[in-house]
């Protein structure tokens, strides 16, 4: 029914391989184990966010509250650790995940019960979270620090592989299981295709929407926890630069922005591709202006290639 | 009159809300309802209003334009290079700035129509390109705009803020005649049902390209007006304006599923959004709590304005929307 590996979802992997090969001509250090594993570590941050975004996009919606769910989770977890209390320190990560799930459910209520377009509702939730963060921290950088657990989740290594990458893969594996082996996954895609028909077949569509947004919120919160562990602190608007690359990673991975079609396999490739592209553009030391232009052109070219390939077969 | 109100329900509600907010604002402002206060308010509102109009043209054909802010950044930085010097130079400069905006929109439209990619993704990618070009034109904020010209369009005419005069001109000299043209009608036809529009013999491709070009053109006008108000070029303005323009059109009763709403509504939504922000400033709410209140009001306004569920006659009807 839904094959996990489609030509579309292979595209970013091919792109990643081409980037590595082309890049290594100019910068031989790209082919070292250190550089590549470091890219995996950094890709995990974007990858976790994109994993959550994939779930929501499969549903036919979009989640624009990612930046401040991420920042909120980071502020919450570092503040709990910063309190110095061992119990609160232990609760930092679960509390951040619960926060993500809670915001996800609020998003789901607006979308499924009030029927407000997800694009504006999640945008409004995003600005409310921004307001809460400003009120809470007084507009300064929030106090607090990352716990040893958070630091090792973000920067630790197991068997030479970055811990953050392994966490990302584990989350992907669990969610892929949900998407392919449970009714939830089937309902999610069928809502993406046709919500009315899904509702008429007796599916409680609101609960699927709640669950999807809650999962996405937890993914964003997990990304926030890892980023806070990576930087050993939380800072205002740390999530803002991630919103658009997250959506880009999902769509170049072959997931249709209209919902229903696609999957996590492509998203993983998309996150790897975008991380590597950003990194190589930085290594090349070209200015921000060109970086931005090249980034846009390459994303557009990949999307055009996907539709042209389909046009040739149709 | 009653019929008019009934057929333009969304705009009328938006206009009433705006009037209430504006009188609250003028009532709480320490300097009261003076031309000076009104002028500053109107200038800020018109910038977002123009951005919202750009967004409206994309949304009404069932698209969305995430590059509105980027087009504004590009045209703003371009204007900061071209709009100083001789009168003829400035004249050409204005034409060049508007042409640049329209060209950005044309690119969006062509890729959407011939590349068959969803507008949200196309404009996401082109926004990155436009911001890159803007950064190239102005790596750091700076540049200058001719002060005489800037004063002429941002102060007041016989006590009426020029921005309000321009808004009136936009509505009466552009929108009302435009709405009656074939293209004006085509936009709504395409947004309501692409299939029906196509089967009635409309050139749906041309209409969609035209809609995105108009969106780019108005993004350019917004960037130009922003330049007149701030008299500098700044490539970093994109993100805020894109998101606010979406919020503004929704507040103004334009439906994201296309075919419903008007330019007047989009402008009203933008004016409401800006007035809320200005109102906060003098409301006595602690400054740290203001962003939270702005967010809450935005969410509440969208929940009330966008909640079609309240008008649905049965549960199935909400899914069709």
Image: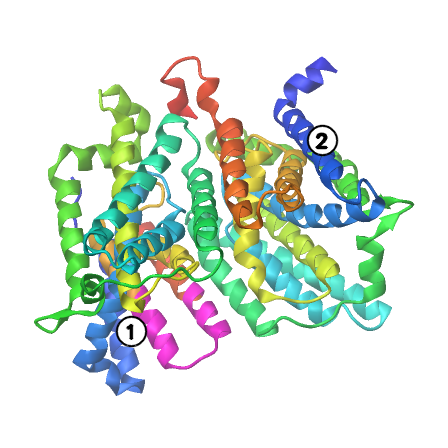
User: How far across and down, in percent of the image, does residue B69 sit?
Assistant: 56, 55
Q: Is residue A212 above or below residue A307?
A: above
Q: Chain of mark 2?
A: B
User: How far across and down, in percent of the image, does residue B53 sit?
Assistant: 63, 43
Label 2, secondary structure: give it: helix
Q: Distance between the Cα atoms at labels 2 and 1?
A: 56 Å
Identify the residue position indicated by label 1 in the image: A19
Asked if labels 2 and 1 share a chain, the reply is: no
State the residue at coordinates (64%, 44%): B274
Reply yes or no: does residue A286 show up in magenta.
Answer: yes
Q: How is the image coloured?
A: rainbow
Direction from residue B20 to residue A262 in the image, left or right:
left
Identify the residue position indicated by label 2 in the image: B19
Label 1, secondary structure: give it: helix
Pick out the residue farthest to the right: B158
- State which quadrant residue A236 falls in: bottom left
- Position of the N terminus of chain A by quadrant: top left
Reply yes or no: does residue B99 show up in magenta.
Answer: no
Q: Which residues are magenta?
A: A274-296
Direction from residue A157 to residue B89 in the image, left or right:
right
Q: Is residue B201 visible to the viewer in this orientation of the structure?
A: no
- State which quadrant residue B154 falls in: bottom right
For the stretch drawn in magenta, the main secondary structure is helix
Q: Is residue B232 above or below residue A24?
A: above
User: How far across and down, in percent of the image, does residue A191 sit?
Assistant: 28, 32
Q: Is residue A170 above or below residue A17?
A: above
Q: Chain of mark 1?
A: A
User: How far across and down, in percent of the image, does residue B259 sit?
Assistant: 54, 31
Direction from residue B245 to residue A313 in the image, left or right:
left
Q: Nearer the viewer, residue B98 or A40?
A: A40
């Amino acid at each position: 029914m839904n094959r996990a590996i489609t030509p579309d979802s292979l595209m970013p992997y091919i792109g990643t391989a081409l980037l590595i090969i082309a890049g290594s001509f100019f910068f031989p250090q790209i082919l070292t184990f250190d550089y590549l594993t470091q890219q995996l570590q950094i890709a995990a941050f974007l990858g976790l966010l994109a994993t959550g975004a994939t779930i929501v996009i499969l549903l036919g919606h979009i989640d624009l509250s990612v930046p401040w769910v991420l920042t909120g989770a980071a502020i919450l977890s570092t503040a709990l650790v910063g309190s110095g209390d061992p119990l609160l320190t232990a609760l930092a990560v679960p509390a951040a995940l619960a926060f993500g799930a809670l915001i996800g459910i609020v998003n789901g209520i607006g979308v499924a019960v009030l029927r407000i377009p997800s694009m504006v509702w999640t945008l409004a939730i995003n600005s409310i979270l921004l307001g809460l963060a400003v009120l809470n921290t007084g507009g300064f950088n929030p106090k607090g620090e990352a716990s040893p657990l958070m630091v090792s989740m973000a920067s630790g290594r197991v068997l030479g592989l970055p811990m953050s990458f392994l966490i990302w893969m584990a989350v992907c594996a669990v969610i892929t299981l949900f998407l392919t082996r449970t009714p939830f996954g089937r309902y999610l895609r069928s809502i993406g295709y046709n919500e009315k028909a899904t509702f008429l077949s007796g599916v409680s569509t609101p609960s699927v929407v709640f669950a999807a947004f809650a999962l996405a919120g937890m993914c964003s919160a997990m990304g926030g926890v890892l980023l806070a562990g990576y930087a050993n602190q939380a800072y205002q608007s740390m999530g803002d630069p991630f919103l658009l690359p997250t959506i880009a990673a999902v769509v170049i991975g072959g997931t249709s922005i209209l919902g229903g079609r696609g999957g996590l396999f492509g998203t993983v490739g998309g996150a790897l591709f975008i991380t590597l592209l950003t990194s190589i553009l930085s290594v090349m030391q070209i200015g921000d202006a060109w970086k931005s232009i090249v980034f846009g052109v390459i994303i557009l070219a990949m999307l055009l290639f996907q539709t042209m390939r389909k046009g040739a077969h149709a | 009159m009653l019929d008019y109100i009934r057929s333009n329900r969304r705009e009328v509600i938006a206009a009433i809300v705006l009037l209430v907010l504006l009188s609250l604002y003028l009532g709480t402002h320490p300097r009261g309802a003076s031309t000076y206060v009104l002028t500053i308010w109107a200038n800020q509102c018109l910038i977002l209003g123009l951005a919202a109009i750009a967004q409206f043209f994309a949304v009404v054909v069932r698209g969305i334009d995430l590059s509105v802010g980027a087009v504004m950044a590009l045209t703003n930085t371009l204007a900061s290079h071209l709009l100083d010097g001789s009168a003829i130079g400035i004249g050409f400069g204005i034409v060049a700035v508007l042409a640049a905006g329209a060209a950005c929109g044309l690119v969006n439209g062509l890729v959407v129509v011939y590349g068959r990619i969803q507008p949200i993704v196309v404009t996401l990618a082109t926004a990155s390109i436009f911001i890159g070009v803007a950064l190239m034109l102005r790596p750091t904020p700076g540049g200058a705009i001719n002060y005489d010209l800037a004063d002429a369009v941002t102060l007041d005419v016989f006590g009426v803020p020029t921005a309000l005069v321009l808004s009136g001109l936009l509505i009466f000299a552009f929108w009302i005649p435009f709405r009656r043209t074939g293209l004006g009608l085509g936009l709504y036809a395409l947004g309501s049902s692409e299939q029906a529009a196509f089967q009635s013999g409309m050139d749906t491709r041309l209409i969609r390209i035209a809609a995105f070009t108009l969106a780019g053109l108005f993004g350019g006008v917004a960037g130009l007006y922003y330049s007149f108000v701030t008299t500098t070029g700044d490539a970093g303005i994109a993100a805020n304006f894109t998101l606010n323009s979406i919020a503004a059109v929704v507040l103004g009763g334009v439906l994201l599923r296309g075919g419903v709403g008007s330019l007047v509504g989009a402008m009203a939504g933008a004016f409401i959004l800006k007035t809320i922000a200005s109102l906060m400033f003098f409301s006595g709410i602690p400054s740290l709590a203001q962003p939270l209140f702005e967010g809450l009001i935005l969410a509440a306004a969208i929940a009330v304005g966008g909640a079609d569920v309240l008008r649905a006659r049965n549960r199935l009807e909400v899914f069709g929307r």
